Image: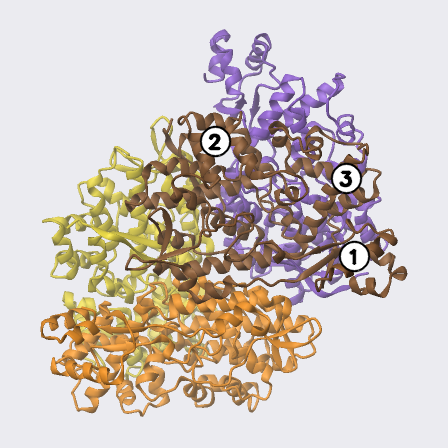
Chain colours: A purple, B brown, C orange, D yellow
Amino acid sequence: MCAQLLEEKVFKDPVHNYIYVQDKVIWNLINTKEFQRLRRIRQLGTSYLTFHGAEHSRFSHSLGVYEITRKIISRFERNKYEDWPPEERLVALCAALLHDVGHGPFSHSLEEVFDTDHEQWTCEILLGDTEINNVLQQVSEGFAQDVASVIQKTYHQSLVVSLISSQMDADRMDYLLRDAYFTGVNYGNFDLERIIRVLRPYKGKIVVKESGMHAVEHYLMSRYQMHWQVYFHPVTRSSEIILRQIFRRAKQLYEAGYRFKWLVPSLEQLFTNQLSLEHYLKLDEALVQTAFSQWADESDNILSDLCNRFLHRKLYKYVTVTKPEPEQYSAIIEEMHQLGLHPDYYMELDFPFDKPYDVYEPDRHEAKLTVKTPILLLDEHEQICEISQKSDIVRSISGLRQGQYHLYFPLEIIKKEERRMSPRLKQWFKL
Amino acid sequence: MCAQLLEEKVFKDPVHNYIYVQDKVIWNLINTKEFQRLRRIRQLGTSYLTFHGAEHSRFSHSLGVYEITRKIISRFERNKYEDWPPEERLVALCAALLHDVGHGPFSHSLEEVFDTDHEQWTCEILLGDTEINNVLQQVSEGFAQDVASVIQKTYHQSLVVSLISSQMDADRMDYLLRDAYFTGVNYGNFDLERIIRVLRPYKGKIVVKESGMHAVEHYLMSRYQMHWQVYFHPVTRSSEIILRQIFRRAKQLYEAGYRFKWLVPSLEQLFTNQLSLEHYLKLDEALVQTAFSQWADESDNILSDLCNRFLHRKLYKYVTVTKPEPEQYSAIIEEMHQLGLHPDYYMELDFPFDKPYDVYEPDRHEAKLTVKTPILLLDEHEQICEISQKSDIVRSISGLRQGQYHLYFPLEIIKKEERRMSPRLKQWFKL
Amino acid sequence: MCAQLLEEKVFKDPVHNYIYVQDKVIWNLINTKEFQRLRRIRQLGTSYLTFHGAEHSRFSHSLGVYEITRKIISRFERNKYEDWPPEERLVALCAALLHDVGHGPFSHSLEEVFDTDHEQWTCEILLGDTEINNVLQQVSEGFAQDVASVIQKTYHQSLVVSLISSQMDADRMDYLLRDAYFTGVNYGNFDLERIIRVLRPYKGKIVVKESGMHAVEHYLMSRYQMHWQVYFHPVTRSSEIILRQIFRRAKQLYEAGYRFKWLVPSLEQLFTNQLSLEHYLKLDEALVQTAFSQWADESDNILSDLCNRFLHRKLYKYVTVTKPEPEQYSAIIEEMHQLGLHPDYYMELDFPFDKPYDVYEPDRHEAKLTVKTPILLLDEHEQICEISQKSDIVRSISGLRQGQYHLYFPLEIIKKEERRMSPRLKQWFKL
Amino acid sequence: MCAQLLEEKVFKDPVHNYIYVQDKVIWNLINTKEFQRLRRIRQLGTSYLTFHGAEHSRFSHSLGVYEITRKIISRFERNKYEDWPPEERLVALCAALLHDVGHGPFSHSLEEVFDTDHEQWTCEILLGDTEINNVLQQVSEGFAQDVASVIQKTYHQSLVVSLISSQMDADRMDYLLRDAYFTGVNYGNFDLERIIRVLRPYKGKIVVKESGMHAVEHYLMSRYQMHWQVYFHPVTRSSEIILRQIFRRAKQLYEAGYRFKWLVPSLEQLFTNQLSLEHYLKLDEALVQTAFSQWADESDNILSDLCNRFLHRKLYKYVTVTKPEPEQYSAIIEEMHQLGLHPDYYMELDFPFDKPYDVYEPDRHEAKLTVKTPILLLDEHEQICEISQKSDIVRSISGLRQGQYHLYFPLEIIKKEERRMSPRLKQWFKL
């Protein structure tokens, strides 16, 4: 069942213009219900509250990653590079298409509150009783497992893994271009066609011809800019904080025996950490938004207030602070309690760089990974070196790591208690 | 309260690059919960099932209409045209921003099944007990009513009305550009800046300098192309048909006393035609999608099947047919019944031009209107004439009206009964 | 010598992003001096005086026509269409690249005044003693002749001819996109990738899949708009008129024995209709502009004035007139003479449609041809029909032919004689 | 004569879409013959031999600088900044428009060979007997001198000077965007609208709101990329080397009494350093190209060969070398002489960074200046600091200065003598 379609099919895509499907397997995978579900999960989570155009879904991003991978491989084939094993084409394309299929709604926030992991779900979807597994099985015995192992980075052909997950892989290339397009922030544009032209398979790795060094620099600068302009935008951080607080509060209430006026089984299973695959697949952003809309009428004030804030975009404000000493922070929390302000919900300290993000080295998606694939240059004498050894720009941005602590809180609520506050607390909130 | 903001605020927008807010009223209106709700309603309804990028919301479109109106008026002011009454600026901007605020989820489909009307809801939102009304009231006594009357096209200053609703108004200009951008279909691009430069206020009407005739032709051709490439796309029609069938089936079941496993008050009020404003505002596309996801598990086969089709994009196929004679059509329906195929749900005849749409004259949004505002040219001798009198292109496309009848149906289900079908029915479905 | 390059080479191109060269022949042709000469001839003649960005050369256009042809053929090959003869690839690519190589400076104007023809020169360059001929000869005996016959439309494979010269060929597609890009007029944009996707070789002709009809309509509307917005722009017409008058005056003076302070052999040979290939190749736009700059100091007032007008863009003004009766026109000319105003130089009547241009049928480049290749649709039943039989838009624009007579003249000079003019002449110039 | 035009005029521009002219003075300046002459001088000199789209003229760049300045000032006026003196508007606009009016053909190369300086010519054109001076005089006594002093950076209002010449002025902003557009290299794109929004006049300086720091970083990275990708491109360097060698050879021949078959007074005056303004204005790129085309037939072999190389783009090849020791270099030159290879013409060592260029600090245009205007940030407490103190990116790129030595030479000619060469010389040319 590795058949080609009788006629190439296309999807109209604003970023790549057209996405070309030539293989029946790819076509069938796109038409599974598990893949169609990605239409109901946004690529950028709550960023649409900052950039109103950023409503694009993981469905379109997944098609984009597939398309970039397809273009890279086509060029490898056209140039007949010896280091490219042609039989790996289909497994690479399937892994590119499916690498994000296990994502849930607002994944990063959800995974911080609940014990769930989208990469594990991806494997369950690929290997469990699903339409996707059914399509993959028809290619060959073991094909589904191969695709899963590419996504888990354990596949025996490291070249295929590095196409999908490395410092400059099809995933990152698509999301930078796509997020730039839909937010309207043009900092994420780089010359994709040129990058594709300078990639080479070489001894089990994807490397970059040295003549393409400036194109890589440009790509890395785009990443740097997108992190600061879009991914770390304080308004987005504020909405993520509220989202996590809603999840936390709902879970806490559930565990305390609170009777919700409105609840569905998928959410109950989420609260009790007993999600079945069937109910995980029903967990989409429509459901989360509906829950928030219904919970806005719950009797618990904190939950109701937080839901209204999220829906109507009455987000927390922030001030820039210096990192407090532990005892100072305890005292602040103590006083909050005394004033009747729940410190878990009415205050959150955020430090974008406190995460293992780094503009160059690690990355927002695979933050947990410890082993990174560096970008390698191949010079005219077929010598390989890591890019920051040749590029001053890359070397200088590799080490950058400073950021600022931001304190987020509901300004009107905090202000009401201003008169009762100690000078220290007032200063903390910069009132 | 017509105050200017201390500092101009901006929204980053992919279509207009930046949207500028200078008035405190506009800023406050955008921050109301009724306006924020538009983030949860897509501009193009089910089109995202055809064009995966088309996830953009009515929120972004409404900002766009406001921005185009702001630009037109700024130019009128900069050129000090005598026919432009400067005191109408704010009412025009508010009407532009709010003209779509009453839209519900998948409005056009919803309104075909239920007795509800987004224009009426717009008025209720402007004049009822809402945050929007509260902001408008602070401008002056009667201001909310003025804004509403612009949207209802009854405002005493016809110039203001024609900015917002005419054959070439800020609404159409924004949606053509925006829909083109998010679908990726570049047919909708026209030269907005040039169109704005050739508009003139003239004796209570917006007219076009004759030198801008070709720019208007280009705009009308863009409209024509967008109708055929995007708005009438058969896949989109198919998904709208299924959407309406779900609504119809659910209503029918409700009226027949069926007990839904899952229902919320907003939907019950919709079924019984007793929607309160509060519950109408909870009716967003997240809720509709959640309902479909939950109803996929209902025991009614038809409802469950339709919901799965919508969610997993297993849409109806279509064949092109000639319009059947009434008696022929009755016989077909009769046979469908006999075969146990519900003709209301397993078949739908669609004729995009059977609606009072016309590429030039009437329009997809205000299809009910009978009086249209033509596009007027102003020549160098200050004479006015309707554009199709001067432009061959416009004249030739004004009359175009033919289309094709498409028959939509669930191919696998119909095929199952093929052997039991009469030759006539087989031919009808082109089996 | 049909060798492939060891490594694909690219040219950075603003319109197609990259232009890919895979064949050594193509690379060598580009590097000949006759092809490099096209860098010194503008694609749009005097249009840069209207649209300051329109400085692009025939060199870049020729590369673009090659690239579009290459893309079309690559798709034909990828889809293994039986009707495409693979051995015709190289002859088609060479013809695409070289089809304009015989153009001289401001060709269309030059050819109206002098007895010279760029298509003949193209053949001489391909078949004469040139670097280009040398490269072509190395492919095979007769190859140069084959390429020439494609350009002359006499090649035995009509399919190859129609790629290069038809109503929707690679030539037109590139120039519409390129002229739109460099003028900044976005009316010329159409979806090239989509057009390429719907083209098919079919029984010796290039046809269009019926599903691509709207894409073709969009392309034809782009052509229509570009003709009106760019190619027929009155300021461009005015500069072309002056250009022709300069050529006419210089030739007239030369024939009358006037001694030019400045002249070069190429121009002398042009005046006497005895151009050798060597001197034709020296005739570029740099030389023409230098001539005008030097002739601005000639003692002949008419020549000097015209040259200054062209160089400093003091063009003729125009008024719209109705076509005069012959006797009326003779009387006007008579009075001009009496007033001492040379009617050949101080007045020119222009009617853009008096030429055999037509938006759809004929074309600005091959205006002399009488047999045109219509655009053919291929329907799902493999039936072919001419597009205007299916498309209302195309049918309605096919017949359009009206235009306006414009009278061009030097306003300040004519005005000086106003008092001495008859009422008829005053009215003629609309003074 | 500070009159406004009755109706705003526009130029269609590919970079800024439209360029708006509101002042009669600006309109009249554009229509002078000295300004129109800029149409015949390319913005990027010989870069069109590397990037075939880069044919754009200094005319279009000058309009662009004017337009950016107009937009910045309009925003200053709209926001009623106290530190902006409104009476300076016209002088700033005129200086922006005219800052490059003294440029000659291939200026930078020309000025390296001949003793001429475009800034001096700019002053002569503004203050001498020209149409431009005539227009400026009509504004007021001393206005022409004011405009000239802005360009010379001696104007009493330093704010106006810094609009036109600083590290982030209207000149640089336009050329980065324009060169990116016409070459097709998209590295030069940055968000102009955003940069304009964060500029402030402040105590006689243009400063940047701190919130705009990332936009400035992006702009500086664009500059960095454009230098490496476009301005320092080895093919462009090679063509500039040949250009300078042609000028040098022609001058040398002239001084040695060589009788040119073809010469014009402007070139003779250039050789003898006695250029009158009248003849300087005739020196455009058309003339230079015509000269090369005619000199290709001169009897001097070196001149003829160099001219053919330039016209037919048979440029010098290059190898990367390490900087030779002086005595080593002398020996090389000595051996070249012995072999009959003129070392002045058949070899040139180039080090792009040997010039006082620097990505951030100095600049390719005003290389001679020693005092630079740094980019200043204005924080929320109205404190000013230089950007590299806040931005890690800027700090890290400020110091970068390394480059590579390239040796350019005519490969075929050098190769012919290979057998006679010493091993040292062979190694030098990497044969």
Q: Which residue lies under the disc numbered 3? A: B252
Q: Which residue lies under the disc numbered 2? A: B29
Q: Residues within 10 Å of mark 1 (few under 14, many from 20)?
A: few
- Check the picture and name the quadrant holding the N terminus of chain B: top left
The disc, 1 or 2, on the residue closer to the chain's N-terminal end is 2
SS at circle 2: helix
- Mark carried by residue B202: none
Q: What amino acid type should be assigned to the residue bearing mark 3?
A: Gln
Q: Nearer the viewer, residue A131 or A360?
A: A131
Give the letter of the chain under mark 2: B
**x, y (%) of residue A202?**
66, 58
Q: Nearer the viewer, residue B183 or B385?
A: B385
The disc, 2 or 3, on the residue closer to the chain's N-terminal end is 2
In the picture, residue A111 is in which quadrant?
A: top right
The disc, 1 or 3, on the residue closer to the chain's N-terminal end is 3
SS at circle 3: helix
- Check the picture and name the quadrant holding the C terminus of chain B: bottom right
Spatial CA span between label 2 and label 3: 38 Å
Spatial CA span between label 1 and label 3: 22 Å
Q: Nearer the viewer, residue A378 or A259?
A: A259
Q: Which residue lies under the disc numbered 1? A: B330
Residue at x-position 15% and y-position 81%:
C335
Give the letter of the chain under mark 1: B
Residue contact at pointers 1 and 3, CB within 8 angstroms: no
SS at circle 1: helix
Residue at x-position 46% and y-position 85%:
C369
Residue at x-position 18% and y-position 59%:
D121
**x, y (%) of residue B252?**
77, 39
In the picture, residue B270 is in which quadrant?
A: top right
Q: Residues within 10 Å of mark 3 (few under 14, many from 20)?
A: few
Residue contact at pointers 1 and 2, CB within 8 angstroms: no
